[in-house]
Image (tube, rainbow, N blue to C red):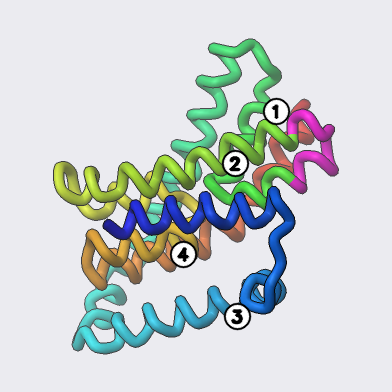
């Protein structure tokens, strides 16, 4: 049900943007998107904090906590290499696009600025599709594979937009790993994009 509500919300948001619908609520939300995200993170923090001993358990991972973000970064770059071979586009461009790891707004804008608008548009759409695809796939992965795979499909968005779905279908431990993963992946997105485009 949460996936349906999120897709409906996205479609309504797109409609409001396309038709330039304005009212006090929409203006307030659009001007305070960071605040909305902070409220979401605060709510998730409360949920995690209520689980006694969860942070102690996460500390037990030590360096193993970096395995998930490292795997996602390497997997995204590998996906770019495969797309480069299949589509015949330069490796640097393909890996730059996949280096967005779902963060479509930054990937699109950065690649448009560093390369060109067409490539930036492709980066925007492909990373947006990864995020939307995540909304549908996360419930299936949580049920049929394991909860950590839910973080992998979400990529850099695992700390914000896809976090509610991960919270709904997994557990608090996975949510903590998800937030940590999102922070690490988001940190590397602009670095990897710049690095990959410099290879062209």
Question: In this figure, which residue is indicated by the disc labeled 2?
Answer: 99
For the C terminus, the image quarter is top right
Tell me the element at label 2.
loop
First-in-chain label (2 vs 1): 1
How far from the left and from the top, in percent, is residue 116? 84, 33
Q: Are marks 1 and 3 in contact (CB under 8 Å)?
A: no
Q: Which is closer to the viewer, label 1 or label 3?
A: 3
Residue appearing at x 64%, y 71% in the figure: 26
Q: Tell how many labels.
A: 4
Question: In this figure, which residue is indicated by the disc labeled 3?
Answer: 35
How far from the left and from the top, in percent, is residue 42? 44, 84
Answer few, some or many: residues within 10 Å of disc 3's Cα (few below 14, many 20 plus, some between 14 and 19): few
Q: Which is closer to the viewer, label 4 or label 3?
A: 3
- How far apart are labels 1 and 3 at the CA level? 34 Å
Answer few, some or many: residues within 10 Å of disc 2's Cα (few below 14, many 20 plus, some between 14 and 19): many
Q: Nearer the viewer, residue 105 or 95?
A: 105
The label on residue 93 is 1
């Amino acid at each position: 049900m949460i996936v349906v509500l999120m897709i409906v919300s996205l479609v309504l948001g797109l409609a409001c943007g396309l038709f330039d619908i304005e009212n006090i609520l929409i203006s307030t939300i659009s001007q305070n998107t960071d605040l909305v995200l902070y409220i979401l993170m605060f709510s998730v923090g409360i949920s995690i904090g209520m689980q006694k001993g969860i942070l102690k358990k996460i500390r037990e991972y030590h360096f193993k906590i970096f395995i998930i973000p490292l795997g996602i970064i390497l997997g995204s770059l590998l996906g770019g290499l495969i797309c480069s071979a299949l589509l015949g586009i330069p490796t640097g461009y393909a890996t730059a696009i996949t280096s967005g790891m779902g963060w479509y707004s930054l990937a699109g804008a950065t690649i448009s600025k560093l390369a060109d608008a067409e490539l930036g548009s492709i980066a925007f759409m492909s990373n947006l599709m990864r995020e939307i695809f995540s909304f549908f796939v996360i419930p299936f992965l949580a049920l049929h594979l394991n909860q950590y795979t839910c973080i992998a499909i979400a990529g850099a968005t695992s700390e914000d937009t896809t976090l509610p779905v991960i919270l709904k279908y997994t557990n608090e431990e996975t949510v903590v790993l998800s937030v940590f993963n999102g922070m690490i992946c988001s940190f590397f997105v602009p670095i990897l994009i710049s690095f990959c485009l410099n290879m062209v």
